[in-house]
Structure formats: structure tokens, C-alpha cells
Image (tube, helix red, strand yellow):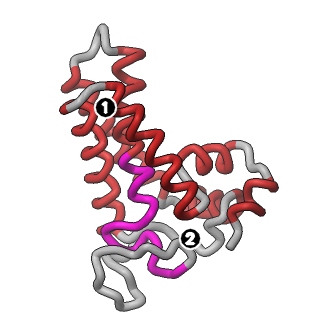
Amino acid sequence: MGRVWWCEVGDYAPWSWDIWSSHNSQHLLDPYSLSHFQHGIGLLLILQVCWGRWLSVQSCTILVALIEAAWEILENTSFMINRYREATISLDYFGDSIMNSMSDYGVCLLGVLLVRKTNWKVGVAVFIACEIGSVLWIRDSLMLNILMLTYPVEAVKQWQAP
């Protein structure tokens, strides 16, 4: 897929907090790490609600891990990179570094761990807090990304612009 291992700009900091820079999605952590944390929370809760009667928590955890791995691959395809550029504020997005993808995967599993160690109410509260925090911080979030990727709204895109 032609992904780089680490940020080619030469910054070796483990994080990058500026979504408008070429460092975004190239370090271990960035503002979008919150959305991957939400992936873990949301996917586990959805699986437990929909199939919890038939699947164990361990099976649901494995399914979340497989879904997130598939998403990390899909997210870094030319199709998805171009979709992000067309429909969202990520005009300069050119894919994740390998280390960023691995970190996103790990952060997702931390979201799963949160729900497993607490309960669904805590999971929902943290999910909502991440949404609100992301919107206030970077004017973007998991739910806004889903909206913009599936049904772009120009007013949202204009509001998100720097």
C-alpha cells in the first residue's frame, strides 16, 4: 500500500496535535486517536446489544479487533484517501503512517477495554465526551466524519474550515 513507517517530515515526537499540518496521521497519537478510541467503545457496545445473547464478550472483542484491522486497511486505500479529500476537511490527507495505524488499532482496543472493565453507561458517557471534546477541539469528530463521508453537508464543511 506504499505507507511510510513514520513521519517523513522528520519530527520524531510521539504525537502531533495540529490537524492542518503534514504531521497529522503520521505520529503515534493525534486528535483523531479519540475517534479510534470511540471505535472500540461503540463497536463493542453495538455488538453486545445486537448479538450479546449469542456471542461472548471475548467473541465480541475479537470481532471488534477484526473490524478495526479491516478499517485501518480500508482507510489507507487510494479510494478512501480520495474520499476523505473530496468530502471532508482532510484536504491534505495522504494516509496514515504504519506506526499511526498500529497506534490507532491499539487505541481502539483501549476503548474495548474501558467498556469491558466498567459498564455500558460509562462507555456511552465517554463516547459522548469524546465527541463533544473533539468538536470543541478540532471541529471534527467520529460522527461528523461518518456524516461527511456518507452524506457530505457543505455547511458543516464550511464550519470546519480553518
What residue is shown at x 22% (from left), y 18% (from top)?
56
Residue marked by disc 1: 63
What residue is shown at x 80% (from left), y 55% (from top)?
155
Percent x, y for residue 160? 68, 63
Residue marked by disc 2: 93
Q: Residue placed farthest to the bottom in the image?
A: 10
Question: Can you say which quadrant of the picture contains the C terminus?
Answer: bottom right
Which region is colored magenta? Answer: 21-37
| Left or right: 101 as drawn, with respect to 150 | left
Q: Is residue 1 visible?
A: no
Instruction: Tell whether position 48 is magenta.
Output: no
| Left or right: 102 as drawn, with respect to 75 | left
* Mark 2 residue crowding within 10 angstroms, few (<14) / some (14–19) / many (20+): many
Q: Is residue 16 visible?
A: yes
| Left or right: 106 as drawn, with respect to 138 | left
Label 2–label 1 contact, CB within 8 A? no
